[in-house]
Amino acid sequence: MKLPRDYNIFGNKCCCCLEEILQGSRFSDSERKTRISAQTEKMGKYFGTDGFRGEANKNLTYEHAVKIGRFLGWYYGKRQGKKAKIVIGKDTRRSSYMFEYALCAGLTASGADAYIMHVTTTPSVSYIARTDDFDCGIMISASHNPFYDNGIKLINDNGEKMDEETILKVEEYLDGKVDVPLAEREEIGRTVDYVEGRNRYVGYLIGMSKYSFKNVKVGLDCANGSAWSIAKSVFDALGAKTYVINNEPNGYNINTDCGSTHIEHLQKFVVEKGLDVGFAYDGDADRCLCVDEKGNVVTGDHILYIYGLYMKERGKLLNNKIVTTVMSNFGLYKALDKVGIGYEKTKVGDKYVYENMVENGHRIGGEQSGHIIFTKYATTGDGILTSLKMMEVMLAKEKPMSELAAPLVFYPQVLKNVRVKSKPDAQNDPDVQAAVKKVSEALGDTGRILVRESGTEPVIRVMVEAESDEICEKYVDSVIDVIREKGHLV
């Protein structure tokens, strides 16, 4: 399978930020206006769509963690009229210990009881927060980022990402706009070892499988992260012949040349060992990518297609729709059209996928990166759950992963970044918009163009998907040439 290529004319590898589409050949004018206006949403000063993230003790410090704990412990205690009960999990980064203890100090100082799940996955914290009567959950992780970064994700009592209103209150406290009293005497909180919560989550996953995995040879890449102590236990319990790589975390090797962001190692491992399938997770195991028995990558788009079709065939695909983001490959939509499955498109970010699913009652959605959400079973992306669901389809249909994925043919993709003086000026330039419209019309139903504004850099991203690399290059360059001619480049 030919994977999309990313280009950056300034020499840096592009990463997909939580951005929005500015123009798109597959969207109506009303859809486009909705998506463009969504960029003006109020964004938090510290918390983005996936928590408060930054380099440990540089952008995100232990003082931040103490304060977040202080506020949450007080806020939920005051709101409930009783001692707050908050569960905490962490990934394998060295700094996660520091943030765990800092959060516990803040929580207990404000009168809350902190329940510690230790090293565990983000979806496990989500699961326990909603099933074990917690006021909220906290996950310490920077997902697929390098070890020196970390993050604090806030989860509500339903296992969902924390609502914006509460997060903004946390930020007000971080900025010194709110006073929070210290608990005293018998009101001071305590910490509780809660490894039983992680064990219960493992049991939940094992009990979910409808099939025995006996004699199926499965490869797992745990990214030296949260999945290392959970994934193998689940597959072993279900009878699989489990082969694991990158399951020796040392605090510094999480995501380092491994996991879903470096899936080439699992590809080689599956072929060398003659395995039936492989699954790669990221640092906190909320995403999963697959490798078929031939060593080909099975992306999040493939997973949406494979499981969505499986649901449709059994009459389980409510509304006959799958929720995607604007970054899903054009080939996914062509494949879904062929089997009569509809789809929604949201902004990039599993938060927006989940919101759409809840609002419209859809059952499956996700991102190309492997964040897949099954709302019947979880309120967030869950990498291990996703791998179990893919095993289910293989075993139910008695087909290898390569055959299940074959109908989805990826369109070549070229993405280039251009550094501009002003993103609004560049994107609103009539000549630039005319160039984008011209490409959109030329592609018709054989491809698409997306022009997106970076959320973190003075950069406009121009992406084209079409039937060949040459067509992609030509149309991307045609838009960039206009941006250059109009004097927008730095």
Image (cartoon, rainbow, N blue to C red):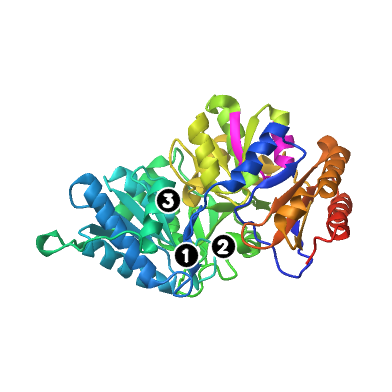
Q: Find out whether the residues at labels 1 and 2 contact each other: C-beta distance under 8 Å.
A: yes
Closer to us: 38 or 271: 38
Q: Secondary structure at mark 3?
A: helix
Residue, disc 2:
259
Return the x and y of residue 436 as percentages of the image width and height: 82, 45
Q: Earlier in the sequence, mark 3 or mark 1?
A: 3
Alpha-carbon distance for marks 3 and 2?
A: 17 Å
Closer to us: 225 or 133: 133
The three-letter code of the residue at mark 3 reads Pro
Q: Secondary structure at mark 2?
A: helix
The three-letter code of the residue at mark 1 reads Gly
Return the x and y of residue 483 as percentages of the image width and height: 83, 56
Instruction: Specify whether residue 28 is in view.
Output: no
Label 1: few (<14), some or many (≥20) within 10 Å? many
Closer to us: 144 or 402: 144
Q: Earlier in the sequence, mark 1 or mark 2?
A: 1
